[in-house]
Image (cartoon, rainbow, N blue to C red):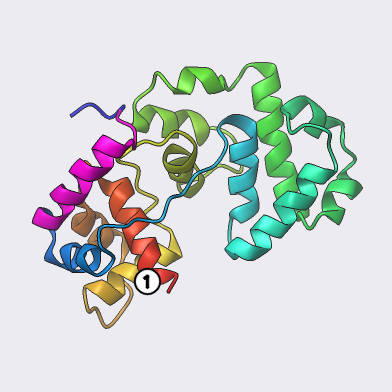
């Protein structure tokens, strides 16, 4: 199946019906939630990537507060303007020195032409991940979340996300947190709608 499918209204409905048939545990959750799924949307391009870098290993509330402060120290969020901001000013927003470095790596990659954001739209999921993770600071989690939140791809899967791991443990009744191989095996059942499965699992974790 073509990887370049996006999460529109039609595909969301198809995915929900597919997951109901594929996994009784997800079917139960969907029934309880009356098929409602929380969205995960971010701006595309540099702004979306920076937002995801900020979110790494932070709560949603903390990340949102820091990102709002980052936006305030520049007139417009762009790689060019970001590179002009003094590091001390960026640190004053709550960004760690490491995250400032990561964000600058992304800004440099875009301004130098190493990363062409628009070209990513033509690539399959695996190719997008390959391009993004070449940049220091962007790991698989950030790349997969970019696919989901910024590109609206329907089969992204940020498998290392703690919220997803805990949600899978809960709905599958596991005594211990599942290892990566177990998670990947379980998620195979949800292809090609793993983005929808992830959104659904996050909704149970956020309760």
Left or right: 15 as drawn, with respect to 38: left
Q: Where is mark 1, residue-wise?
A: 166
Start-end of magenta stretch: 5-21
The answer to whether residue 58 is seen in the rendering is no
The answer to whether residue 121 is seen in the rendering is yes
In this view, the residue farthest toward the left is 21
Q: Is residue 73 magenta?
A: no
Left or right: 53 as drawn, with respect to 118: right
Considering the whole magenta stretch, tell me its main secondary structure: helix
The image quarter in which residue 121 lies: top left
Residue at image position (33%, 47%) is: 195
Residue at image position (13%, 60%) is: 23
Q: Is residue 11 magenta?
A: yes
Q: Position of residue 161 (x, y in %)?
A: 43, 59
Front residue of 125/139: it is 125
Query: Helix, strand or loop at disc 1?
Result: helix
Q: Position of residue 145 (x, y in %)?
A: 46, 45
């Amino acid at each position: 199946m073509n990887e370049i499918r996006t999460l529109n209204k039609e595909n969301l409905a198809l995915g929900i019906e597919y997951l109901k048939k594929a996994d009784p545990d997800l079917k139960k959750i969907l029934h309880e939630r009356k098929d409602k799924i929380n969205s995960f949307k971010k701006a595309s391009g540099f702004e979306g990537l920076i937002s995801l870098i900020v979110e790494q290993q932070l709560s949603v509330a903390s990340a949102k507060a820091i990102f709002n402060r980052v936006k305030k120290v520049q007139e417009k969020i762009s790689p060019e303007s970001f590179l002009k901001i003094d590091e001390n000013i960026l640190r004053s927003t709550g960004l760690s020195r490491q995250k400032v470095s990561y964000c600058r790596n992304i800004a440099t990659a875009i301004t130098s032409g190493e990363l062409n954001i628009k070209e990513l739209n033509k690539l399959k999921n695996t190719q997008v991940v390959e391009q993004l993770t070449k940049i220091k600071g962007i790991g698989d989690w950030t790349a997969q979340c970019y696919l989901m939140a910024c590109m609206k791809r329907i089969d992204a899967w940020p498998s290392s996300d703690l919220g997803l791991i805990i949600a899978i443990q809960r709905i599958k009744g596991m005594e211990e947190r599942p290892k990566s191989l177990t998670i990947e095996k379980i998620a195979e059942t949800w292809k090609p709608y793993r983005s929808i499965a992830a959104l659904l699992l996050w909704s149970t974790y956020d309760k």
